[in-house]
Image: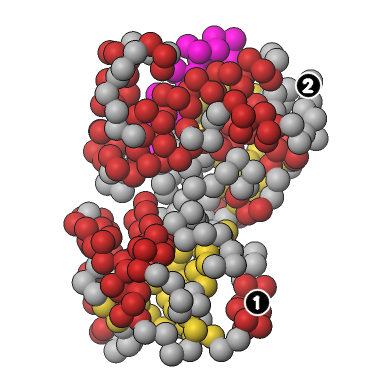
Amino acid sequence: MKQEIIRKGFVQLGKLMVSIGEGKDWQDFNLGVTKDEYEQLQVIVNRQIAYNGWFTKENVQQSLFALGSQLTEEKLVDWTSNYTFTKKPKSVALIMAGNIPLVGFHDFLCVLISGHKAVCKLSSDDKTLLPALVGHLITFIPEIKDRIVLSTGRLDGIEAVIATGSDNSLKYFEQYFGKYPHIFRSNRTSLAVLTGNETKEQIELLGNDIFNYFGLGCRNVSHLMLPKGYDLNHFFEGVFSHSNVINNNKYGNNYDYNKTVYLMNQSPLLDNNFVLLRETELLFSPLAMVHYHYYESEQEVSAYIEKYKEQLQVVIGEKYTAFGEAQCPKLNDYADGFDAMNWLSKL
């Protein structure tokens, strides 16, 4: 199948995803679906929270918009022009995580647009969104149907594996899939480096990097590096617009639990009634908590980033990725910084 055909199918799917992500009503057939089909997709989006309490309507729409926005003809051509693809398609297993909506979509896109067959093992926490999108993709490109397998059970006939999970999952991945060419991913998180000169608007954008998807993604900031003497009231004032995060029962339960545990252990905490701040150099923080520590020089910042480079997904800050952009990855922003497309092109 020609890549141009696959690309055009994803471009059409992208238009649909963006429209749903923006919360728009059906306008016309330019989206490639009927009004009934469009409204059915809206129903699936709205029902996600019944399957997974973290998947609010807003979170699912945000994911659809962020992913769909990358599926333009110009962006796809620019991205794929950097690779030479195989003419011998292989069956690539995709073991998908379910921490945020459609977190495995980029891998799915990479496998198909590189000419391979995607054998997807869906997460039990996210098992309806991708099938709904695949149904429309097959409508746009009927001949791609034989290159997509969706499963929640055993994977058969695979020749390569891309697996995403926790640190504990790595042993499982190695045991069952280590014999195949593979990409195995485990826990990562993100860091923000502040200078003290940030505006309130920039801190509010940093709040997006922390609280979008309730902090469940590897691109969510879990640690702040602050210049010595930084006034944390500036941070609390800037992120206050995100206070409604506490109204989600799952997030609120994590907030209450962690607050109780740390107070019982007499661990010092700062609290603004929707997020906890703990001073420590530990990179990873529990849900509803952000770690922070102070630095005195740029050398300290560089040393910290170097120390944890294998566990960092994104670094946010004036000299790094812009505030508010953590959850807006481009097509070439690969998980773990590993070029999956280059790997797929050489299978």
N-term mark: 1 or 2: 2
The majority secondary structure of the magenta stretch comes to helix
Residue drawn 45% across the image and 40% down it: 66
Residue 88 - label? 2
Q: Looking at the image, is 1 positioned above or below residue 291?
A: above
Q: Are marks 1 and 2 in contact (CB under 8 Å)?
A: no
Q: Quadrant of residue 102?
A: top left
Residue 241 - label? none
31 relative to 250 in the view: left or right: right
Asked if residue 286 lies in the magenta stretch, the reply is: no
Amino acid tagged 1 = Ser
Q: Quadrant of residue 89?
A: top right
Q: Quadrant of the C terminus?
A: top right
For marks 1 and 2, give the CA distance.
43 Å
Q: Looking at the image, is 107 positioned above or below residue 254?
A: above
215 relative to 23 in the view: left or right: right
**For the residue carrying disc 1, how many other residues have a C-alpha within 10 Å: few (<14), some (14-19), or many (20+)?**
few
Q: Nearer the viewer, mark 1 or mark 2?
A: 1
Residue drawn 35% across the image and 29% down it: 20
Q: Looking at the image, is 185 positioned above or below residue 15?
A: below
Asked if residue 136 lies in the magenta stretch, the reply is: yes
59 relative to 218 in the view: left or right: left
Amino acid tagged 2 = Lys
- Which residue in the structure is indicated by mark 1? 302
Q: Quadrant of the N terminus?
A: top right
Q: Quadrant of residue 60?
A: top left
Q: Which residues are magenta?
A: 124-145
Give the percent coordinates (x, y) of residue 339: 70, 45
